[in-house]
Amino acid sequence: MISRRRGKGAGILGSLCLVGGLVAGSASPVAAVGENMVSQWDLIAENTVVGSGVAQIEGLIYLSYTQLAVYDAVVAIEGGYERYGPAIDAADDANAEAAVAQAAHDTLAHYFPLSAGSLDTALAASLASIVDGADDISDGLDVGAEAAQQIIELNEDNDRPDGEPFNATSSFPTKDPAPGIWRLTPPTHTIPQIPWAGDVAPFVTASGDQYRPAPPPALTSATWVADFNEIKAMGGASSTLRTAEQARIARFYTANVPRQWNIMVREIAAADSLGLLETARLAAMINTVAADAGIAVMNAKYHFLFWRPVTAIDPGSVTNDGYGPVPGLTDGNPATVEEPGWRSLIGTPNHPEYPAAHGTITSAVAEVLTQYKGTSKIDVDIHGFEPTGAANNLDRVRHFDKANQLRADIINARLWGGVHYRNSTEIGVDLGRSVAKYDLKHAFEAVP
């Protein structure tokens, strides 16, 4: 059983509308595959959470609440794996499908009360589809309700800042203006995205800074010069060195992250004909490990406050944001040459650069798949954005045979998109792997 620490952000500045990078998307939902009750409620959870307008790492946190409640409910009835929360006394004949539906419903309704009506309708439809007797269903509902309540209680002080909407920003320790210090980025110069998430108590790891990496490279280092020059050449909106396919790959990863990983969960469950227990475990592992990786990377980002490529390459891109002078500062290194008007291919996210969030989370998920499948040959399809399609679509599919192919893809994609230096995503990949290995060693393990 996991005993969670509690913590939250403070010093509220207001709410924000996110742009670029790790932002919430409103893509049309991808239909649940198969008749598995966990998959059905995974889709309902995805639509509820993403549809609320949460920031993407924030969304992974709320999806984790839901999937952990579902996981604990099924484990209470079927056994087989270590529970996450306190033990639940389940009747021998408790219906696991009913438990799944009730656990997901209650958790989502608690955190997203504006969706209560649609969640009630979905719950009624789920229960109507169950063929077992009323007593078995009633016992299952009791288990699901208890699982949800326990997850809610474990996290009662571990949410976004009090009274604030989704995407709430918060105060964070700043640094004196200097070369290398993060500035708000064009074109919108949007205020900082969810700094409080770095102070959230992780689900399994001991703290958000447990695997905090070493500082970003010094601006006098060979690594910095190589990173600066490579992304300037390859990541700019008007780059002539980047191929059309590389640009498509960069845009592929502008898709909504929670949707990408939960679509994958449902497709694996359908392809492998997983039952309730295995599907619940996979969904809980993917979302929880991804959320812990997200917490770790936000903790590091707001600790180091390293500047984005756009403000390093074009110091004139900054505005009067309170973080330094206008125009911005140069790195002072004669081996790099700034370029007025340089802009990244894809929108720069409104949080600090180091390390890369996409690299961290993607690598963590790759490690989950490796351990879940028992091999680095993960053999999965990932859905992402197709530039020729509608806004926020997930129409393009990329296949990955091995975990490290996926990791290499995200490193290149963030470079080609112009939003992360190569070194930053490589460090993120290492961070995500470390978080995942720890989480999977301390949770979701099989029991006799």
Image (cartoon, rainbow, N blue to C red):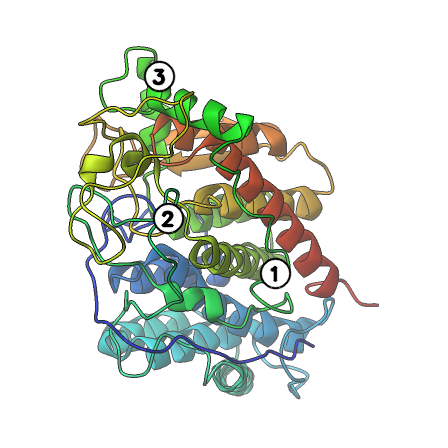
Residue 158 is left or right of residue 202, and the answer is left
Q: Residue at 57% across / 57% down in the picture? A: 289
Residue 412, horizontal then vertical, whole percent: 46, 26
Residue 370 is left or right of residue 262, and the answer is right
Residue corresponding to mark 3? 245
> Mark 1 vs mark 2: which is more N-terminal?
2
Would you call the spot at circle 3 few (<14 residues within 10 Å), some (14-19), or many (20 or more)?
A: few
Query: Which of these two is toward me, 326 or 105?
Result: 326
Residue corresponding to mark 1? 281
Residue 238, image quadrant: top left
Query: Which of these two is toward me, 321 or 115?
Result: 321
Q: CA distance from mark 1 to mark 3?
A: 36 Å
Give yes or no for contact between labels 1 and 2 (Cβ–Cβ under 8 Å): no
Q: CA distance from mark 3 to mark 2?
A: 32 Å
Location of the N terminus (image quadrant):
bottom right
Q: Residue at 27% across / 55% down in the picture? A: 323
> Mark 1 vs mark 3: which is more N-terminal?
3
Q: In what element is the residue under mark 3?
A: helix
Q: Is residue 132 visible?
A: yes
Residue 246, image quadrant: top left
Q: Nearer the viewer, mark 1 or mark 3?
A: 3
- In the image, what residue type sits under mark 2? Ile
Q: From this view, report whether residue 43 is shown above or below residue 111.
A: above
Badge number at residue 361: none
Residue 274, horizontal then vertical, whole percent: 60, 52
Residue 262, horizontal then vertical, whole percent: 44, 51
Location of the C terminus (image quadrant):
bottom right
Residue corresponding to mark 2? 181
Q: From this view, report whether residue 74 is shown above or below residue 360.
A: below
Q: Nearer the viewer, mark 1 or mark 2?
A: 2
Give yes or no for contact between labels 3 and 2 (Cβ–Cβ under 8 Å): no
